[in-house]
Image: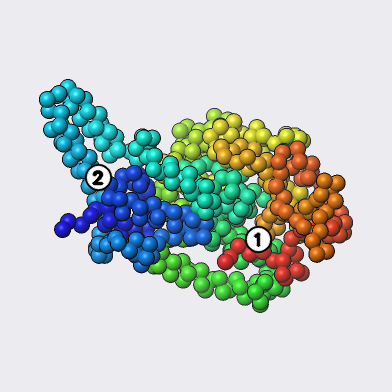
């Protein structure tokens, strides 16, 4: 009995833990003609995107438990790429067989038969050329599954952000998205980009490519390590991690040395046991006088095959079309458009940092017009986040994240801590009654995440003025966040 190519692909996905190759080849549930294989493929997709099991692929044993009547073919030497090619060839043969049957049925009406054959052959050739075209009537089951996933609220479609509210609004960073973080200088936008990258690496086992044009790779590496540890960056760069307690015992210096010993080993173990090749890859081509453009970044993407791409200081890149580096609107527009193409060509989210223009400091509203250099950035992006920094004291900042451009989100923004290295968690504020008084339960003031419904509210709260430190500490019900003296409040991304 011939082995089912569809079940063979399911078995190979389970054996390798790799579904990306199949999805990148354009394989969707509607391509399966075997009912059991289709149900198993849909189950794998749900499992892979579930918030509780995000990034993981069910094993053969788990598939057997959920589909006890289905016998998967035994393990073989085929690569996942070969199994995908076998599946696609099988799909083409099935469609050809259907075409032959149709031609036989309509041989008495050759004009209809030829017209149908012409359309079907063109369709098969189109599918061979590209995997991004969607015939809606052919992929209705996928639309149904996307709806059910959203309805059940158990699935996140893309790579998760560190903040639940942003995941709820956007379903994570999705393939092909172009995301911009922008702010005035020294507003921690690079830190935010790295925090998102480290969370993707640490919480979702992702492979992250960080491309830097402004800071050295070593500086970016040090910041990433602090974010993984949850260690204050000031203590790292000034060499007093030994004085900072770790929330689980010992000091941050001890945790740092432990990370140096285990990070590579942990990545190797995950690579052996799962499809993930999680790593953080930092690259710069400042030494290359002809580098610095999107074409060079494409080569890096080809080399490292990342799940997420982060470009720091996008405005410093070279315009490959004119072979120039400048802040002229035409050059910046070309860079933005080429980055958007890169995201869509490789079906990966691209996250970048950009400057906000000077007028944004005085504007009461928050719009994508605050982006500097070129309107193309606002036009091309799928999500834009403007960062408004408010300094609290020497160790603490607060950041307003204004969603100034979004295809999906329906909130104006939210507030987070902005303490480099050890805390970018959500800010909270007291829950109040209709008279504006804090609500208490068992003597404790109830709080909620700081989420804003309009941009005026963000502007009023994050006015950029330094607060009196003593008054801030005494403010009832406010979540001050961690300090180096408060062990229990030290925040860490690492799980």
Q: Residues within 10 Å of mark 2 (few under 14, many from 20)?
A: some
Q: Residues within 10 Å of mark 1 (few under 14, many from 20)?
A: many
In the drawing, does residue 250 fall left or right of residue 432?
left
Q: How many marks?
A: 2
13 over 323 or under it: above or below: below
Q: CA distance from mark 1 to mark 2?
A: 50 Å
Task: Work out which residue is located at the far top of the displayed protein and give it.
Answer: 111
Q: Where is the C terminus found, in terms of image quarters?
A: bottom right
On the image, the x and y values in percent for residue 389 come to 73, 47
On the image, the x and y values in percent for residue 136 come to 38, 35
Q: Identify the residue position indicated by label 2 in the image.
A: 91
Tell me which label, 1 or 2, sits earlier in the chain. Answer: 2
On the image, the x and y values in percent for residue 221 come to 56, 60
Can residue 293 be seen at all in this image of the molecule? no
Specify the color scheme. rainbow
In the drawing, does residue 207 fall left or right of residue 131?
right
In the drawing, does residue 220 fall left or right of residue 359?
left
Pointers 1 and 2 in contact (CB under 8 A)? no
Front position in the image: 339 or 286 = 339
Tell me, for residue 421, which label it has, or none: 1
Instruction: Say which residue appears at 12% left-offset and 28% top-offset.
Output: 107
Quarter occupied by residue 68: bottom left
Task: Work out which residue is located at the far front of the displayed protein and give it.
Answer: 69
Can residue 412 be seen at all in this image of the molecule? yes
Instruction: Say which residue appears at 62% left-offset and 75% top-offset.
Output: 254
Quarter occupied by residue 418: bottom right
Q: Where is the N terminus found, in terms of image quarters?
A: bottom left
On the image, the x and y values in percent for residue 39 come to 35, 53
Front position in the image: 300 or 49 = 49
Q: Secondary structure at mark 1?
A: loop
Instruction: Say which residue appears at 36% left-offset and 46% top-offset.
Output: 28
Q: Secondary structure at mark 2?
A: helix
């Amino acid at each position: 009995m011939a082995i089912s190519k569809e079940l063979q692909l399911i078995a190979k996905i389970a054996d390798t833990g790799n579904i990306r190759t199949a999805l990148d080849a354009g394989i969707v549930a509607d391509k399966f003609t075997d009912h059991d294989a289709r149900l198993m493929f849909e189950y794998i997709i749900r499992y892979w995107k579930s918030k509780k099991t995000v990034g993981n692929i069910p094993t053969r044993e788990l598939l057997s438990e959920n589909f006890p009547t289905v016998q998967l073919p035994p393990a073989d030497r085929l690569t996942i790429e070969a199994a995908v090619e076998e599946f696609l060839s099988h799909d083409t043969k099935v469609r050809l067989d259907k075409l032959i049957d149709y031609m036989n049925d309509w041989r008495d009406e050759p004009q209809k038969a030829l017209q149908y054959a012409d359309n079907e052959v063109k369709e098969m050739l189109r599918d061979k050329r590209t995997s991004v075209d969607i015939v809606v009537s052919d992929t209705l089951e996928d639309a149904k599954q996307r709806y059910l996933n959203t309805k059940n609220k158990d699935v996140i479609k893309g790579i998760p952000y560190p903040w639940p509210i942003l995941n709820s609004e956007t379903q994570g960073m999705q393939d092909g998205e172009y995301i911009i973080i922008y702010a005035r200088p020294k507003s921690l936008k690079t830190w935010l980009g790295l925090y998102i990258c480290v969370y993707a690496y640490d919480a979702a086992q992702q492979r992250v490519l960080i491309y830097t044009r402004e800071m050295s790779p070593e500086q970016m590496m040090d910041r990433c390590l602090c974010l993984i540890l949850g260690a204050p960056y000031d203590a790292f760069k000034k060499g007093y991690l030994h004085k900072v307690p770790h929330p689980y015992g010992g000091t941050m210096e001890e945790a740092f040395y432990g990370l140096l010993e285990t990070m590579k080993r942990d990545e190797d173990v995950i690579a052996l046991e799962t499809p993930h090749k999680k790593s953080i890859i930092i690259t710069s081509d400042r030494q290359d006088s002809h580098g610095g453009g999107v074409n060079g970044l494409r080569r890096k993407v080809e080399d490292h095959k990342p799940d997420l791409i982060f470009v720091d200081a996008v405005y410093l890149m070279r315009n490959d079309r004119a072979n120039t580096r400048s802040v002229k609107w035409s050059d910046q527009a070309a860079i933005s458009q080429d980055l958007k193409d890169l995201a869509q060509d490789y079906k990966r989210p691209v996250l970048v940092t950009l400057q906000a223009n000077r007028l944004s400091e005085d504007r009461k509203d928050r719009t994508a017009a605050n982006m500097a250099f070129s309107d193309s950035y606002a036009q091309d992006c799928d999500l834009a986040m403007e960062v408004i920094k408010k300094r609290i004291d020497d160790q603490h900042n607060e950041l307003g994240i204004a969603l100034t451009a979004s295809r999906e989100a329906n909130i104006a923004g939210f507030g987070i801590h902005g303490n480099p290295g050890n805390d970018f968690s959500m800010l909270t504020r007291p829950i109040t009654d209709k008279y504006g008084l804090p609500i208490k339960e068992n003597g404790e003031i109830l709080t909620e995440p700081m989420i804003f419904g309009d941009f005026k509210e963000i502007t009023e709260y994050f006015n950029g003025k330094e607060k009196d430190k003593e008054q801030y500490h005494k403010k009832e019900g406010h979540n001050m966040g961690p300090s180096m003296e408060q062990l229990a409040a030290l925040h860490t991304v690492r799980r």
